[in-house]
Amino acid sequence: MRVGIVGMGTVSAAGADAASSWKTYQRRLRTWAVDQVTGVPIYPVAQLPARPTIDTFTADYAVDRTALLALHAADQAVAAAGWSGRDFSILVGCSRGPTQAWEKGYGTFSREGTVPPRTSPATTLGSIGFVLAEFFGVEQIASSLSVTCSSGLHALLHGVALLRSGMAERVLVGGTEAPLTPFTLEQMRALRVYARVDANTEYACRPLACPSSGMVVGEGAAFLALELVGAAAVVPALEVGFCRETGVSRTGITPTGEGLQRAMRQAIGEGQLPDVVVAHAPGTRQGDAAERAAIGAVFGQRRADPTVTSLKWATGHTFGASGPLGLVAGVQMLKMGRVVGLPYAAAVEEKGDLAPSRVLVNATGFGGNVVSVVVEKNDSQS
């Protein structure tokens, strides 16, 4: 038995679902805007679709935007999996937590010296998981976790462990992030890696480009419904690898990406090398260079030359949601038989005629936490 993806859902600046996001990737559309408060480039979700069940729920149950994005993506995944009315576990990764609720609550406290009664638990990371659990009416574990930018794939890692240990039959995993708030954006700008662009720039974030563009923050969510499946199941199957590097830099990532190398090798195992790597690649000089070095070490050892790509030109860096967004895109590449390439000339060369059969997705985060996921077609799909 393997871990299979039986449903998925996504919302980001690229689109409000997987189909619209795929169109954005293929048409290479511009999706960024300028934040009206800070003046920095951002990747916002343009518009959420009307969903009566979600609209009714959020009207009765005040939720932060982080949870709202999660509800939209998770509802898509649950519907695709056919889990409506069934019980399942929920694991959601989020780097920053409910940022809007937190900043609003602290702003009220700063002005008035008091806060509304439900400021807690609305400002806690755990609130995202139990909002999802309340919406779906499930009774199994519903947990939120934060491992910085690799939070979403760490949620997947924990979900795989639940399935393989027999502690769950169905697990909804994913990541969500709504960090387009003044305090969060100022924190990112203080790191001195944020992109500076003019209004005519087509892609504010250009991962893997030379010279590097700098990071641009985006909001979004992506969820995947996981089950143990047999070899005959016509669903994508996955393997995972993970590692933590010791603190050798501010981010915990070495110049040669040693942790990335170990995680990728673990996920790949002894099987066929992936055709495509969806890199974490935040658009920063050191981050992109470390990942390029790690990919070169892993694939060069076996004389392979995968297509290396990233989605952050269309979604921005969505922190904890970035890994699951990349994984959803990887599954779409397998289904569509096409690679989502990088739309600018100074990027890594893409192989446009490639019909991928195995895709590797990376996520790294501060503290040196790395997760790599390989998703592939089952034998019956090949």
Image (cartoon, rainbow, N blue to C red):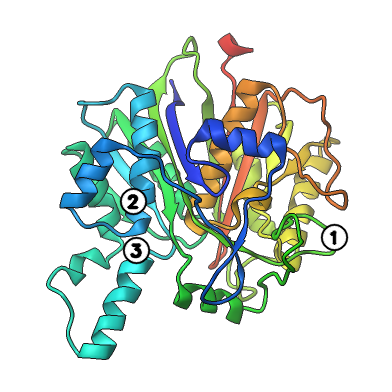
* Labelled disc at residue 68: 2
Label 3 or label 1, whichever comes before in sequence order? 3
Write down the residue under mark 3: 98
Question: Can I make out residue 375 in this image?
Answer: no
Q: Amino acid at mark 2?
A: Leu
Q: Nearer the viewer, residue 37 or 177?
A: 37
Q: Are marks 3 and 2 in contact (CB under 8 Å)?
A: no
* Residue drawn at the location 50% of the way across and 13% of the way down: 234
Q: Please name the residue shown 31% across and 62% down the image.
A: 125
The three-letter code of the residue at mark 1 reads Cys
Q: CA distance from mark 3 to mark 2?
A: 10 Å
Residue that carries the numbered disc 1 in the rendered image: 210
Q: Splitting the image into 4 quarters, where does residue 48 fall?
A: top left
The foreground one among 273 and 361 is 361
Image position of 132 (left or right of 367): left
Q: Is residue 320 left or right of residue 191?
A: left
Mark 3 touches mark 1? (CB < 8 Å): no
Query: First in sequence: mark 1 or mark 2?
Result: 2
Determine whether the residue tagged by mark 3 lies in a helix, strand or loop. loop
